[in-house]
Image: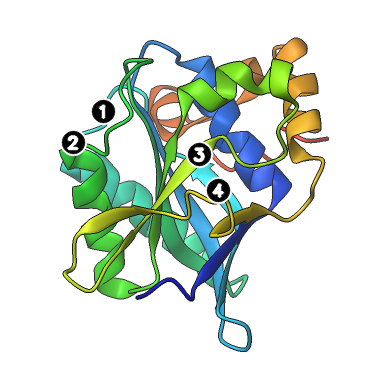
Amino acid sequence: MGGELCYEIAQNAYIKLVLHALKHKTSTVNGILLGRVSPQNDVVEITDSVPLFHSHIGLLPQLEISLILIEEHFAAKGVSIVGYFHANERFDDHELGGIAKNVGDHIYRYLPQAAILLLDNRKLEALSKTKDRSPVVQIYTKDASRTWKLVGSDGNQLTIKEPSANVVLLDYISTEKWQDVVDFDDHLDDISKDWLNPELFK
């Protein structure tokens, strides 16, 4: 796909994913990125996200069911799946693992502009000291050889739509807002818990 594509993530979509990872610090967590491709300016707009799992990461049936439910719900809004989010279990693990690549491959089959966002724990930990405005995630896209490659180390490939998103994120971290995040694991345990998280930012 070359380096010409840019990705822009909305503040709430970004914060929801990071809070989900913080809620389950000792687990691998994942999520789905939703949005649309803007052909006029080669931008993939990530408008929302859905936290998926913190315990059944590698189980295909749960993943397939969740993807179907997500696609059905958001299709009516003119939004589709545009990527995948992954946070590794170990703090010092900065590699894109097999499960993340496999889910990314699945999404890529339907959308060649799909991206994988990998939480960068080093950036997240340093955030309170550095006040950095760039996302605390690494972005991977498929290159011409169809392998997932880390891109945009200069920070231009992925931007947050709202420049103050990390300030808001730090505020939510200080108030332990992550406790309110519901993922598909939570929903499967108790169907009264809404995986859409409609109350999270109210």
Quarter occupied by the C terminus? top right
Q: Which residue is mark 2?
A: 59
Amino acid found under the numbered disc labelled 4 = Ser
Binning the other alpha carbons within 10 Å of mark 1 as few (below 14), some (14 to 19) or many (20 upward) gives some
> Can you give x and y, in whole percent of width and height, for residue 181 in the image?
60, 26
Amino acid found under the numbered disc labelled 2 = Leu
Find the residue positioned furthest to the front.
Answer: 154
Q: Which mark, by number, is residue 154?
A: none
Label 4 vs 2, first from the N-terminus: 4
Residue drawn at x 70%, y 12% is 176
Residue 91, image quadrant: top left
Q: Are marks 2 and 1 in contact (CB under 8 Å)?
A: yes
Amino acid found under the numbered disc labelled 1 = His
Q: Nearer the viewer, residue 72 or 14?
A: 14
Q: Is residue 66 left or right of residue 155?
A: left
> Can you give x and y, in whole percent of width and height, for residue 75 in the image?
52, 71
Q: Which mark, by number, is residue 49?
A: 4
Label 2 vs 3, first from the N-terminus: 2
**CA–CA distance in space, label 2 to label 1:** 6 Å
Residue 31, image quadrant: top left
Q: Are marks 2 and 3 in contact (CB under 8 Å)?
A: no
Q: Which mark, by number, is residue 137?
A: 3
Amino acid found under the numbered disc labelled 3 = Val
